[in-house]
């Protein structure tokens, strides 16, 4: 059974799965598609390019699948995919892509907290947490299990590997390797994210391998591309293959109080 409040506006051709609820003054636009058991809270907006999975909760005043904030955007139809089980909290804003080539994507079971922004053409992996006020610029990429602290920001085209933790108020303007911590403004490498590894279900042995990989990147003084090529070939370090294939902004640096011979 679908429940639509009498003050809500739902386009006749919008597709709502069984068990959906649309609250007071909410808008679901023409062409939008919502899976089963989705909840659209009061005053939320769901745009025409929305492709929303099952069980997604969209909070009060959130704007999902809005036009990209890009001067090059020509108004062509474009998409935003939201994976099943995601929670989009109050007044968060999620943009569609700038072209029809591929959608902006948010993986399953993500939590996007109040006032966070996911820019056009971003790709966010599964089980990520974007805390209050997090800002993702266009084309940013997050691997699975990333956790971004409040009011942190990720610059355009930056890539964060699986299991990355970003401290609150940090500015990330370089790529961050898997299971790292990124801290500060500008963000600097802050060591191995042991908590993220545990939450991802890595065994102690696997965690030790990832920690050793980061030590190789940041402590041995070898060229980054050479080390990444070796790590990407190791099947036990599979996230490094995806990270190496996507990275474009140079590797995040190390703080002055840490010994480093990094070369990128």
Image (cartoon, rainbow, N blue to C red):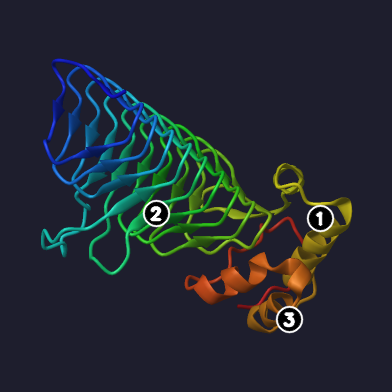
Say which element carries label 1.
helix
Q: Residue at x 17, y 30 (%)?
A: 27
Say which element carries label 2.
strand
Location of residue 98 (image quadrant)? bottom left
- Label number found at residue 207: 1
x, y percent for residue 103: 32, 59
Asked if residue 67 can be seen in this view, the reply is: yes
Q: Is residue 28 above or below residue 53?
A: above
Location of residue 151 (image quadrant)? top left
Q: CA distance from mark 3 to mark 2?
A: 29 Å
Which residue is labeled 3 in the image? Answer: 230
Q: Is residue 173 above or below residue 166?
A: below
Q: Earlier in the sequence, mark 1 or mark 2?
A: 2
Q: CA distance from mark 3 to mark 1?
A: 18 Å
| Relative depth, front residue between 143 and 220 | 143
Q: Quadrant of the N terminus?
A: top left
Left or right of 188 in this view: 158: left
Q: Quadrant of the C terminus?
A: bottom right
Left or right of 32 in this view: 157: right
Which residue is labeled 2 in the image? Answer: 105
Say which element carries label 3.
helix
Q: Is residue 143 above or below residue 37?
A: below
Callout 3 crowding tier (Cα within 10 Å): few <14, some 14–19, many ≥20: few
Asked if residue 260 can be seen in this view, the reply is: no
Left or right of 75 in this view: 61: right
Q: Earlier in the sequence, mark 3 or mark 2?
A: 2
Callout 2 crowding tier (Cα within 10 Å): few <14, some 14–19, many ≥20: many
Q: Residue at x 80, y 74 (%)?
A: 220
């Amino acid at each position: 059974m679908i429940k639509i409040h009498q003050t809500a506006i739902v386009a006749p051709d919008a597709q709502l799965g069984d068990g959906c609820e649309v609250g007071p003054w909410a808008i679901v636009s023409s062409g939008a598609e919502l899976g089963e058991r989705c909840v659209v809270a009061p005053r939320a907006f769901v745009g025409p390019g929305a492709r929303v999975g099952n069980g997604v909760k969209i909070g009060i005043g959130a704007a999902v699948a809005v036009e990209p904030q890009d001067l090059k955007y020509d108004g062509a139809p474009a998409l935003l995919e939201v994976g099943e089980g995601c929670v989009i909290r109050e007044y968060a804003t999620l943009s569609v892509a700038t072209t029809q080539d591929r959608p902006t994507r948010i993986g399953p079971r993500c939590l996007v907290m109040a006032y966070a922004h996911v820019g056009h053409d971003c790709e966010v992996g599964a089980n990520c947490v974007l805390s209050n006020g997090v800002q993702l610029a266009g084309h940013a990429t997050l691997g699975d299990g990333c956790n971004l602290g409040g009011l942190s920001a990720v610059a355009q085209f930056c890539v964060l590997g699986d299991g990355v933790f970003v401290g609150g108020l940090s500015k990330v303007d370089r790529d961050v390797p898997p299971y790292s911590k990124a801290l500060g403004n500008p963000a600097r490498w802050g060591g191995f994210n042991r908590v993220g590894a545990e939450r991802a279900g890595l065994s102690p042995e696997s965690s030790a391998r990832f920690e050793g990989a980061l030590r190789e990147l940041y402590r041995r003084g070898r060229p980054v591309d050479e080390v990444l090529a070796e790590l990407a070939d190791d099947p036990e370090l599979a996230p490094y293959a995806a990270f190496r294939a996507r990275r474009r902004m140079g590797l995040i640096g190390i703080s002055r109080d840490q010994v480093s011979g990094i070369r990128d």
